Image (spheres, grey):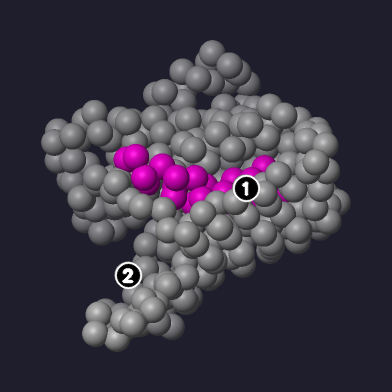
């Protein structure tokens, strides 16, 4: 049943979760390597998702889905959580969290570009404006405002943050081919990704997970970034009478996140970050604009 008030509550809950994760990423990476953080977070998320599926009586669907399309769900898991978070956490490990987070917000712009060859969609004029403005905002953030000099403090970190947007956009394009329950699909992809992440931890890190602070942060990330936030957003969309109003709540998240990074992590927020983030947000809003036709019907044309 549609209930806009419930939709706002679930939407704000999801946004609250997403607003804290940049801080949780940065603090946790003080104690765990990116692979270690992802390993514990993924395992924690799987427990949460399995609990939710059990509550909904949908556990049996995991086997049904896997038998029907094993390769599809393995590919989903390879993209998210395996590759996406491994690369994103590496970016957070190298960059100030404010830079990694705000660069990551350009994924929706990347999605617009990828939708052309993979979904056959056309780019509107307003999309081109959004693309130019969004990536210019990313340049402002990455160079701390020195756009003309192209002076990057950590070029590899910037590249990793932008590559993560490519993987995340690819994941959502692949998800357009998923006709099943999104929660079941997410759980299955995480379960299939866990052995890959375990292998990545063995190769690029180790299993010396002794810092309790790292455990707390990783479990928090798994429960709230990868688990509850996703479910609350699904519930918000399900109850929404006007999905555009709910979708716009997401723009609260990056600014709230910057405040948490300032007061909990102690990062000095660069003016360039605020300028660049504002440009990205405006770009995303431009993408959402529905352009009305010039004439209501052909007979009104001159």
Q: How many marks?
A: 2
Magenta stretch holds residue 207: no
Disc 1 is placed on an element classified as helix
For residue 1, above or below residue 182: below
Q: Position of residue 185 (x, y in %)?
A: 28, 45
Q: Which residue is mark 1?
A: 135
Residue neighbourhood size for the residue with mark 2, other residues' Cα within 10 Å, grouped as few (<14), some (14–19), many (≥20): some
In the picture, measured across the screen, residue 193 lies left or right of residue 210, that is: left
> Residue placed farthest to the top in the image?
203
In the picture, measured across the screen, residue 92 lies left or right of residue 225, that is: right
Q: Position of residue 29 (x, y in %)?
A: 69, 35
Disc 2 is placed on an element classified as helix
Residue 12 shows in the view: yes
For residue 23, above or below residue 291: above
Q: Pick the residue in front: 173 or 240.
A: 173
Q: Pick the residue in front: 242 or 197.
A: 242
Name the residue: 43% across, 63% down.
232
Magenta stretch holds residue 110: yes
Name the residue: 76% across, 58% down.
274
In space, the residues marked 2 and 1 are separated at their CA atoms by 32 Å
Segment tinted magenta in the rendering = 96-118
> Residue placed farthest to the front in the image?
302
Q: Which mark is residue 47?
A: none
Residue 11 shows in the view: no
Q: Which residue is mark 2?
A: 238
Name the residue: 37% across, 68% down.
237
Name the residue: 44% across, 45% down.
113
């Amino acid at each position: 049943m549609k209930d806009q008030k419930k939709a706002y509550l679930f939407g704000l809950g999801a946004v609250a979760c997403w607003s804290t994760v940049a801080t949780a990423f940065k603090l946790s990476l003080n104690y765990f390597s990116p692979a270690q953080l992802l390993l514990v977070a993924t395992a924690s998320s799987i427990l949460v998702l399995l609990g939710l599926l059990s509550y909904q009586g949908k556990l049996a669907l995991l086997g049904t889905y896997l038998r029907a399309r094993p390769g599809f769900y393995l590919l989903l898991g390879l993209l998210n959580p395996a590759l996406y978070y491994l690369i994103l956490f590496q970016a957070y490990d190298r960059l100030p969290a404010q830079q990694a987070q705000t660069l990551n917000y350009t994924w929706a712009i990347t999605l617009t570009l990828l939708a052309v060859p993979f979904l056959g969609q056309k780019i509107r004029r307003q999309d081109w404006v959004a693309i130019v403005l969004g990536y210019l905002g990313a340049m402002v953030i990455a160079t701390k405002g020195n756009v003309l000099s192209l002076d990057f403090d950590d070029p590899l970190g910037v590249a990793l943050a932008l590559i993560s947007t490519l993987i995340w956009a690819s994941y959502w394009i692949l998800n357009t081919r998923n006709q099943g329950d999104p929660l079941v699909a997410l759980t299955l992809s995480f379960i299939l990704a866990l052995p890959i992440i375990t292998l990545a931890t063995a190769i690029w890190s180790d299993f010396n997970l002794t810092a309790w602070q790292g455990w707390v942060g990783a479990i928090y990330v798994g429960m709230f970034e990868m688990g509850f936030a996703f479910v609350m957003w699904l519930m918000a969309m399900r109850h929404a009478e006007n999905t555009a109003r709910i979708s716009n709540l997401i723009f609260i998240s990056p600014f709230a996140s910057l405040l948490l990074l300032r007061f909990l992590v102690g990062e000095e927020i660069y003016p360039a970050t605020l300028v660049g983030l504002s440009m990205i947000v405006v770009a995303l809003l431009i993408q959402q604009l529905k352009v009305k036709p010039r004439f209501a019907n052909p007979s009104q044309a001159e």
